[in-house]
Image (tube, rainbow, N blue to C red):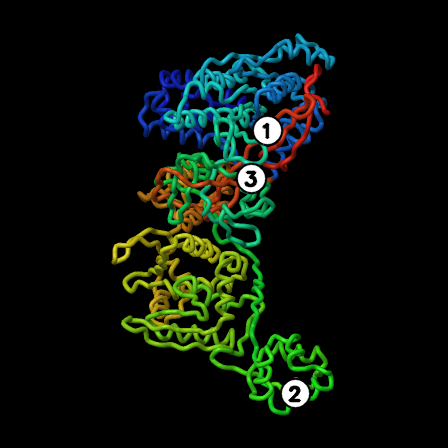
Amino acid sequence: MVEKEKKDFNITDLPGVGAATAEKLEEAGFNTLMSIAVASPADMVEIAGVTEATARKIINVARNKLDMGFETGIEALEKRANVIKITTNSKALDGLFGGGIETNAITECYGQYGSGKSSLAHQLAVNVQLPKEKGGAEGIAVWLDTESTFRPERIKQIAENNGLDANEILKGIRVVRCFNSDHQMLVTEKVEDLIKNDNLPIKLLIVDSLMSLFRSDFSGRGQLSDRQQKLNKHMHTLLKLANNYSIAVYVTNQVMANPAVFFGDPTTAIGGHIVGHNCLTADSLVQLEDGTIIPIGDIKEGQKVVGNKINSDLKVSGASINKKIVNLDAREIFEIDTGNKIRASAKHRFFKLNNFEIEEIYAENIKKGDFIARVNSLEFKGSEQKLPKIEHTEMIIVNKEGSKFIKNQLEKLGFTRKEICEELKVKPRQLRRVLNQEYATNKENVNLLIQNGVGDKLFGFAQQYTSNKYRNIILPDNLTTEMAQILGYLIGDGNLYDTSIRFRDARVQVLESYNNLFEYTFNLRGSISKVKDKKCYQLGINSVELNNLFSLIKQNTYHYISRSPKEHIAAFIRGFADAEGHVDKKRKRVIISQKDDMVLRFIQLLLYRFDIQAFLEKTTTKEGKFCHRLRIDDIEGLKFAQKIGLTASDKFEIIEKWSDFKINERKIFPISRKEIWNLIKSEGYYPTHFMAPKSDKFLTIKNLKQTLEKFKLAGVKNELTKKKIAFIEHLIDSNITWCKVKKINKMDNKEILYDISVHGQENYIANGFLVHNSTYRVYLRRGKKDTRVAKMVDAPQIAELEVGFKISEKGIEDI
């Protein structure tokens, strides 16, 4: 692609770029379509002195001319097949890295002084020059030396002991001594010139060490933010080099003591999570593969999470968690509000749609008005959830004939009343009342009498006994739809007392409906009464067993409901909305309010399974107290009425009338109208033949589909245009939806943050958002008898492993 640009493209071909502007851009390294297409307008304004509008125009035209890298899953797989893996000379270490140090990736090794980080760098600098069949890449190495670690005599020693020409190997290494962080960043940027201008076959870039100069230049907590921002830019440059030129980037890092770690090695990589994991607050709700919704703080290694194959077919996929990370050091977090909310560390990555490309974006770089990825309409099979066993006291009475039968049998068996009571759960005095006064007793005592020889005939003399205290109730083995609805109301506005369950509502009809649910499910009716001095009524269900059952279920509501079938989930939401819901009489809106925002976030995620969008908001009550609410408007309210419903007849009548009105669904797809306009224009058509020239920045999904259909029928010749159309259509049909950021707030953090490493997937769903994390991190330490131990801390598709190796005159070797 680089050669084609040199032949067919001249920077002055771009609108607004004359000779003087072109010279400025080329001096700054903007001499290819790719470099201009990925630039920001701010950079262009500063470097070329053009207006922001002109800068955007230049960038957009460059993007339209350039194949931005859209590819099928097959193409992505083929590209992975071209990845080169550079051997470390140790089979154990190569196995740790999944075959060797990969090109197109950054590999970080961190450890204490003398752990072997620089020794591995020397070995790689030699091995990268080997033929591919011997584990090399047939290229040269560039070494950015920030701590005077490069030793040419060590290179010579390794080469000679492996039968190589030491002089030729040394010629294949370019070394530069970096004196400060700016110099380090500048040299990194100049590596691209060595590849393009000097045609050097660079296949390995070593930065030894990454953080040394950054720590010297930015000391103290007051400069921590500046340091991290600069380091972030540096890492982006390294990643860009790795991806654009198929280079293996190997960086080393020191460690610092971490007193928060009590087990294992108490060290943390310097530079924090810029080159590692970034984290979410403990209450972030993560979606597991079996349907479970669980706070990330409660998640365990080995569980399977749901993500998206964002680099291939955009389908929902599951993968195992191979590591859970705890971050005690984050000083600030960002709260991102799109109508659902998430709080993340500055460097936690989300996904953003930028015209015809899905990009990663750090939390700290997200701005109001950006669109970020959320996963919608997830389908889970679900299953009826097994309920905890509750001991149910069933009482019986024995009639007079039965009493005579028991006395005769005990006499034949030689039992005194005191002796038989030692086998029963009753005292002699109570047994006398059971036998002589038809006093009720636990059915278990009848079974024990029979076990002690009284005989099965006793069942014929026993009768079931019920009273206000002892009810003949049914306790289901599995959670039912009716129970799910009762649980929803209980979570919303119900109360558990020692021996009863109580619901309150202003509508008697609602309480009558729930009384019917109790009777149908448990064979037990309660009583409804007016609450004194309140404009409401109360349903009371007296049962110790039901109280105990719902107490246990309530503790694990998220697990029971999120893993249940869809009809159970709908019933739970309906119950909660019955308790806390309100239907607006003036406009098509359902409001569900609650003090606890976490339970509302849980219900919000459940609503996404029904393709119902609800917006989480913080508001104040009439009394001036803070509360949270879910707002469900217009078409979403109609879907709520159809798929969830409400019990109160007056509320239901209001939302039922909504179906008489035409409600347009206006879902926005965040590729700008201008981009679609230019796409049509690039094929030689007048865009007005396919779309109206409105002032709206984006098209609705409905209008975008219609426009693309007309466009395809007219005939599209350019392969890149076809790819862009296919990309849009594929994305529209996927589970990914795009949410507009309403607010983003930076705040001080005092919480423990968590992240997870997902083997082979690189993303997962938290609070509905698609979030990303991946890098290669290896921790090195000294082992026994001059050996070294390498532990894979994190990698996109490699399980956590630990291997040993040694450093000898030949370089890196197996033990």
In space, the residues marked 2 and 3 are separated at their CA atoms by 64 Å
**Residue 758 in view (yes/no):** yes
Using the image as rendered, state which of residue 294 and residue 3 is in the foreground: 294
The residue beneath circle 2 is 460
Q: Secondary structure at mark 3?
A: strand
Q: Secondary structure at mark 2?
A: helix
User: In the image, is residue 195 above or below residue 718?
Assistant: above
Q: Secondary structure at mark 1?
A: strand
In space, the residues marked 3 and 1 are separated at their CA atoms by 16 Å
- Check contact, mark 3 vs mark 1: CB within 8 A: no
Q: Quadrant of residue 22?
A: top left
Q: Position of residue 159 (x, y in %)?
A: 69, 13
Check disc 1 and give the amino acid type.
Tyr
User: In the image, is residue 168 above or below residue 519?
Assistant: above
**Residue 761 in view (yes/no):** no
Q: Nearer the viewer, mark 3 or mark 1?
A: 1
Looking at the image, tell me whether mark 2 or mark 3 is earlier in sequence order.
2
Q: Position of residue 298 (x, y in %)?
A: 52, 48
Q: Residues within 10 Å of mark 1 (few under 14, many from 20)?
A: many
Quadrant occupied by the C terminus: top right
The residue beneath circle 3 is 757
Check disc 2 and give the amino acid type.
Gly
**The furthest residue to the top:** 167
Q: Nearer the viewer, mark 2 or mark 1?
A: 2
Q: Horizontal placement of 486 versus 531: left or right? A: right
Q: Residues within 10 Å of mark 2 (few under 14, many from 20)?
A: few
Quadrant occupied by the N terminus: top right
User: In the image, is residue 742 above or below residue 456?
Assistant: above
Which residue sits at x=51%, y=51%?
Answer: 294
Q: Which mark is residue 779?
A: 1
Looking at the image, tell me whether mark 2 or mark 1 is earlier in sequence order.
2
